Image (spheres, rainbow, N blue to C red):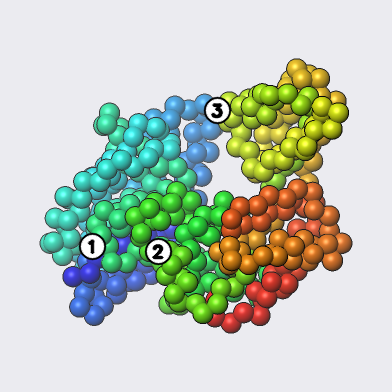
Amino acid sequence: MPLVIMKFGGSSLSDASKMKLVASRIIAKKNIGNKNKVVVVVSAPGDVTDELLEMANKITSNPPGREIDVLLATGEMISISLLAMTINSIGEKAVSLTGPQAGILADINYTRARVKKINPKKINSLLSKNNIVIVAGFQALNSKGDITTLGRGGSDLTAVVLAAKLKADLCEIYSDVEGVYTTDPRLVKDAKKLEYISYDEMLEMAGSGAQVLQSRSVEVAKKFCVEIHARSTFSKNHGTIITNEKKIRRKKMEEPLISGITFDKNQIKFTIVDLPDIPGVAAKIFGSLAKIGINVDMIIQSAAVNKKNDISFTVSGRKEVKKMQRELDKIALEFKASQVVCDEHVAKISIVGIGMKSNAGVAGKMFEIIYKNGINIEMISTSEIKISCIVNEMNMVKAVKELHKGFGLSKREAV
Ligand code: ASP
Ligand code: MG
């Protein structure tokens, strides 16, 4: 009998009527054709995880990770129990399992634990007795016997690791969007749903603003060749298949130049001017930022002139500007740099596509479209399948729309 993993996000579980809809989709999947074994993974309902974090923050600004994990794990436990009750009330057999009960074992890092091993005995025994098994996503057990969580969005990871371990025939991730789009349909009306996207493109898109799947879950899916079908709870339409590049290349006659455009309007840019051109400067700057927990995104160092150069970098998220500013002022003083300039009004636009690998001129085309719209590019960075530009945030929407049009994504039929 085929085995299916179905994962439902918090927005699909935020009230009783949505729970009933989810239950009916699960039951339909179980009873279709020659019948399926079904393992369901759920997130906490609605915004419960954020609400729980707020409760903790009202008590202390520095809660212990162990207790945060105990607190956050309760969110997913609301979902598993209510969903099992819903399915039972419709007359099908369903059993809820916490992450530890489901045999998901992780390392000892609280709040961002890594899955080490899965012991699927209990899941398999419940499946063999014809139960729908409902597992709490995002949580695991560590070697100290404590409950831990797998980082924000970690229910996706639970679904993928279970799909890999149980050798599932299908891994479906349900949310309130129909799949992965060429760009955000809220911004560009004629954005198109992609039929397929490769793991690498998905990772680049997730890392540059698209919020469909947790990045770690895509990395694990790639490693274990778990094909993911990202689709909507509220529609019967086919969503987007996230799979390997070879399979996509086999399906398509000709590669589109790019698959998607992402954006991040939450960027902040720093430039340290007139740094000495000596070894150890970059190590000091980025080492110090890492120590205070700042995750740097793009970095550019200019070539030295008169033994001096500038270093610019961006960070995604504007919350900790003051903290960064203080740290950089200290470094500037130490190296006698002339100034630290901060610009909080920048945005990042990225184009992503495996088609870039075999086509020259994609970068030139991107810059030309941006230039023709009178927009200045402040920073550029590239990878094998992604080109990112920093522009003034005022110009972000226009640039995204024009790039979407210019690369032919608006006109595409089946993508
Ligand atoms: N509830 C957790 C979160 O909000 C895990 C998840 O939804 O995947 O991050
Ligand atoms: Mg989520």
Name the residue located 29 percent from the left edge and 72 percent from the top edge: 29
- Separation (CA) of disc 3 from disc 1: 40 Å
In the image, 408 versus 279, the foreground residue is 279
Can residue 233 be seen here? no
Q: Amino acid at mark 3?
A: Ser
336 up-or-down from 125: above or below: above
Q: Amino acid at mark 1?
A: Ile
Name the residue located 26 percent from the left edge and 78 percent from the top edge: 32
Instruction: Locate the N terminus by quadrant.
Output: bottom left
Question: Is 137 displayed left or right of 97 in the figure?
Answer: right
125 up-or-down from 27: above or below: above
Q: Amino acid at mark 2?
A: Ile
Name the residue located 68 percent from the left edge and 54 percent from the top edge: 388
- Disc 2 C-beta below 8 A from ligand 1: no
223 up-or-down from 371: above or below: above
The local secondary structure at tag 1 comes to: strand
Q: How many marks?
A: 3
In the image, 306 versus 7, the foreground residue is 306
- Disc 3 C-beta below 8 A from ligand 1: no
Residue at numbered disc 1: 132
In percent of width and height, residue 197 lies at 50, 66
- Which disc number belongs to residue 228? 2
In percent of width and height, residue 118 lies at 25, 46
Q: Nearer the viewer, mark 2 or mark 1?
A: 2
Residue at numbered disc 3: 61
- Going from N to C along the chain, the mark reached first, 3 or 1, is 3
The local secondary structure at tag 2 comes to: strand
90 up-or-down from 310: above or below: below
Task: Give neighbour class at mark 3: few <14, some 14-19, many 20+ (Cα, 10 Å).
Answer: few
- Which disc number belongs to residue 341? none
